Image: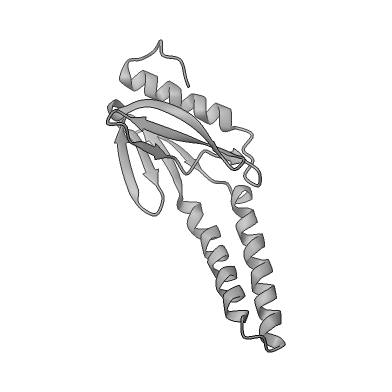
Amino acid sequence: MNEIRFELSVRQRLYLLFVGAVFLLIGTFMWVIGQSTYVVQLGVGTLMVVYFFLFARFGATIDATGVRLRGLTKQHVRWGDIRSIERYSVLGTTGVKLRLIDGRTKRLRAPVTGVLQDDAEFEVKLATLHQWWRHYTGQATAQPN
């Protein structure tokens, strides 16, 4: 079965590892000098490093049946349940969301692009999503949003 996977690259997740390392260093320093708040910094640092590895699993996969969303949970959206595929922007990050027939929206964890998460192929990936959606819903003449 043909499928296309959209995932965050290591480069797109690298800021999490950097921030985590900074907090771990600060926490370690505070522990050495006897500050009691070192636990907070070590906790935040550890959490950011865990996110770096956890976010590697996040993304979306498209195939003939629809879009499989991978985040903390997994969901499947059939092509026929999608009303439109739209871009959204939040705090300098641009991503993709699916507007469903029932009015709900689902945000894809990838592809995304923006500050600290630049993806030079974002427009191509968005066009690919539109192309597959139009093909599998018979909307070959529909224009992408």
Answer with the quarter of the image where residue 18 lies: bottom right
Please say if 120 is above or below 73.
Answer: above
Residue at x-position 48% and y-position 39%: 6
In this rendering, would 129 be left or right of 63?
Answer: right
Q: Position of residue 92 (x, y in %)?
A: 62, 40
Q: Position of residue 61 (x, y in %)?
A: 41, 39
Residue at x-position 68% and y-position 67%: 22
Tally of numbered tags: 0
Q: Position of residue 66 (x, y in %)?
A: 33, 32
Q: How is the image coloured?
A: one colour
Answer with the quarter of the image where residue 64 lies: top left
Please say if 134 is above or below 19.
Answer: above
Furthest residue toward top: 141
In this rendering, would 79 be left or right of 118?
Answer: left
Furthest residue toward bottom: 34
Inspect this view and state whether residue 99 appears.
Answer: yes
Which is nearer the eye, 46 or 34?
A: 34
Please say if 79 is above or below 52.
Answer: above
Q: Position of residue 68 (x, y in %)?
A: 36, 40
In this rendering, would 133 be left or right of 42?
Answer: left
Residue at x-position 60% and y-position 69%: 45
Give the quadrant of the N terminus.
top left
Please say if 131 is above or below 28.
Answer: above
Answer with the quarter of the image where residue 4 lies: top left
Inspect this view and state whether residue 2 appears.
Answer: no
Residue at x-position 32% and y-position 44%: 75
